[in-house]
Image (cartoon, helix red, strand yellow):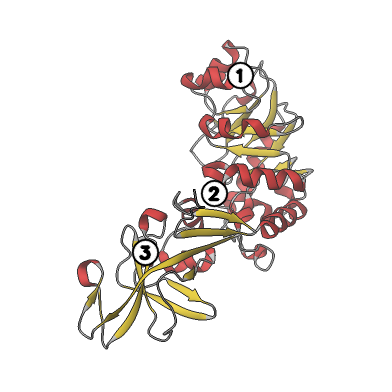
């Protein structure tokens, strides 16, 4: 059987990933710098990301649910910590009790469930303003968690990527809760929170987006490197006559005769319709604009200036996260986590 490859690939830069983690660790001012590897490592492949960060010295990892935790269980050697941010449902209990991963308990029912099962060490989430998951910081948190052995008490910043008083408010609220709750360590800062300064670091930071090349705040510009480089293969080159339309709903009509390349890439791969008529590819140093509407599996680009681009050639997707977010209207998180399973993931 011959080797098989997909017509889509992600070139993943290990040096950039590790450089980003080291910068975030130094910037955070905390004894430990963890890593969020939920959503399949933000689309890069959670196990491969975790293996590389383990070699760099990272020991604390975070996923969203127990299916994600089970996929990483084999990497949990002595001294390696994996926390499940969504806590533990009744349906998760058998897996959770047998796992070396810990639940981040975030509701009173989860706490009662864990206590009743004598579940052992756990983490706890306190809500300091997100109104998403966690115990309300204004309540009797100490009373609610009495009897638990808490490894990490966490909270999550709402809008650290913006300059807003709420981040300082959350910091003060978390400090207040910390004063009444005994835990082995405390953690507040995500990627953007790390950029706010060492006051947000506590005992451990939990970067996600910036590890993978996202720029959460201006302080990270010039320090965070792009990790993900999507590439797509040309399926067909064709001539379009003046007056003919390209793609669904005829959103692009050729003003003059032109040449296009039809690419193996579409919104099923995470290259969403926001890039229609706005995105671009690169052939070497030559910029190739997307023409017409992005469809499920196909995208067209103008190659009129490049007579040598042909079927089977590879083009680089213009995917610098901050710039691609501005062009498409998507967040940097969506751009990463939406990258589909049809890409081959190739680490340099």
Q: Residue at x 61, y 19 (%)?
A: 98
Which numbered disc flags the more N-terminal residue, 1 or 3? 1
Report how far apart the C-alphas of labels 2 and 1 lie in the structure: 26 Å
Per the rendering, the mark at residue 63 is none
Q: Position of residue 111 (x, y in %)?
A: 56, 20
Is residue 245 visible in the rendered structure shown here?
yes
Tag 3 residue: 274
Q: Between residues 204 and 234, which one lies in front from this camera angle?
A: 234
Q: Residue at x 34, y 59 (%)?
A: 297
Q: Which class describes the residues within 10 Å of circle 1: few (<14), some (14-19), or many (20+)?
A: few
Report how far apart the C-alphas of labels 1 and 3 lie in the structure: 44 Å
Marks 2 and 1 in Cβ contact (< 8 Å): no
Q: Residue at x 48, y 69 (%)?
A: 314
Tag 2 residue: 42
Is residue 177 visible in the rendered structure shown here?
no
Q: Quadrant of residue 197?
A: bottom right
Above/below status of 131 relative to 319: above
Q: Which class describes the residues within 10 Å of circle 2: few (<14), some (14-19), or many (20+)?
A: many
Which numbered disc flags the more N-terminal residue, 2 or 3? 2
Above/below status of 305 relative to 335: below
Question: Residue lying farthest bottom?
Answer: 256
Numbered disc 2: secondary structure: helix
Q: Position of residue 324 (x, y in %)?
A: 48, 66
Numbered disc 1: secondary structure: helix
Q: Between residues 147 and 322, which one lies in front from this camera angle?
A: 322
Q: Position of residue 173 (x, y in %)?
A: 63, 39
Tag 1 residue: 98
């Amino acid at each position: 059987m011959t080797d098989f490859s997909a017509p889509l690939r992600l070139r993943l830069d290990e040096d950039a990933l590790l450089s980003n983690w080291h910068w975030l660790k130094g910037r955070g001012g905390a004894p430990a710098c963890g890593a969020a590897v939920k959503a399949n490592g933000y689309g890069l492949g959670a196990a491969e990301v975790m293996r590389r960060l383990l070699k760099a010295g990272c020991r604390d990892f975070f996923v969203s649910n127990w299916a994600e935790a089970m996929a990483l269980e084999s990497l949990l050697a002595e001294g390696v910590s994996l926390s499940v941010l969504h806590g533990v449902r009744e349906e998760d209990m058998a897996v959770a009790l047998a796992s070396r991963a810990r639940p981040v308990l975030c509701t009173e029912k989860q706490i009662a469930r864990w206590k009743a099962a004598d579940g052992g060490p756990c983490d706890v989430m306190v809500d300091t303003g997100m109104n998403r998951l966690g115990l309300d910081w204004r309540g009797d948190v100490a009373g609610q968690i009495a009897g638990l052995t808490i490894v990490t008490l966490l909270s999550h910043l709402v809008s650290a990527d913006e300059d807003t008083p709420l981040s300082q408010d959350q910091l003060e609220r978390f400090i207040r809760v910390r004063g009444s709750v005994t835990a082995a360590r405390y953690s507040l800062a995500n990627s953007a929170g790390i950029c706010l300064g060492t006051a947000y670091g506590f005992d451990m930071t939990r970067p996600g987006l910036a590890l993978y090349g996202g720029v959460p705040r201006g302080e990270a510009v010039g320090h965070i490197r792009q990790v993900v480089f999507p590439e797509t293969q040309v399926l067909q080159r064709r001539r379009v006559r003046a007056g003919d339309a390209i793609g669904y709903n005829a959103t692009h009509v050729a003003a003059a005769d032109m040449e296009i390349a039809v690419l193996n890439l579409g919104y099923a791969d995470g290259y969403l319709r926001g890039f229609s008529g706005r995105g671009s590819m690169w052939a070497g140093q030559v910029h190739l604009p997307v023409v017409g509407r992005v469809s499920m599996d196909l995208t067209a680009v103008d190659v009129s200036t490049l007579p040598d681009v042909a079927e089977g050639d590879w083009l680089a997707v213009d995917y610098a996260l901050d710039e691609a977010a501005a062009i498409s209207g998507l967040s940097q998180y969506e751009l990463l986590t939406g990258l589909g399973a049809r890409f081959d993931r190739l680490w340099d």
